[in-house]
Amino acid sequence: MLKYPISSPFSLLAAKSAVYLDFSAAADTILAIVKERGMHVSFCAQWGVDLAELESTPESPVCTAYGAYIMDIGLQGTFKDSLPLPELRSKL
């Protein structure tokens, strides 16, 4: 189970959105992540790894640290600071 799912920063981004376009973009990204998760679950099932095993597998320390960092930056900063990828920040 992930302590900081990849959708969490986008949820924070949606919450910090001041205009509908930004909120909509964050929501669309969250929905795409949900859809992609389903594809990952299906792919793993083909290899004999079921959902219970996926969800009970410990998150790596690196993933936890990265998720904590992204959420910390997002909680402290502005909408632009909340964008999880530097490439997105540079487009604003």
Image (cartoon, helix red, strand yellow):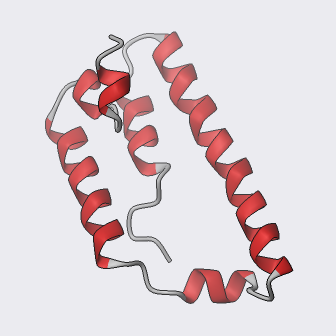
Q: Residue furthest right?
A: 46
x, y percentage for residue 64?
A: 31, 69
User: Does residue 26 appear left or right of residue 91 in this picture?
Assistant: right
x, y percentage for residue 23?
A: 50, 22
User: Does residue 74 appear left or right of residue 24 in this picture?
Assistant: left
- Which residue occupies 33% across, 31% down? 83
Q: Quadrant of residue 78?
A: top left
Residue closer to the observer: 54 or 74: 54
Q: Quadrant of residue 30?
A: top right
- Which residue occupies 82% across, 68% down? 42
x, y percentage for residue 72?
A: 19, 49
Q: How many marks?
A: 0
Above-or-below relation of 62 to 21:
below
Q: Residue furthest left?
A: 76
Q: Quadrant of the C terminus?
A: top left
Above-or-below relation of 30 to 50:
above
Above-or-below relation of 71 to 41:
above
User: Does residue 40 appear left or right of residue 24 in this picture?
Assistant: right
Residue closer to the observer: 59 or 75: 59
Q: Quadrant of residue 27?
A: top right
- Which residue occupies 67% across, 51% down? 34
User: Does residue 88 appear left or right of residue 23 in this picture?
Assistant: left
Residue closer to the observer: 75 or 80: 80
- Which residue occupies 80% across, 88% down? 48
x, y percentage for residue 79?
A: 28, 24
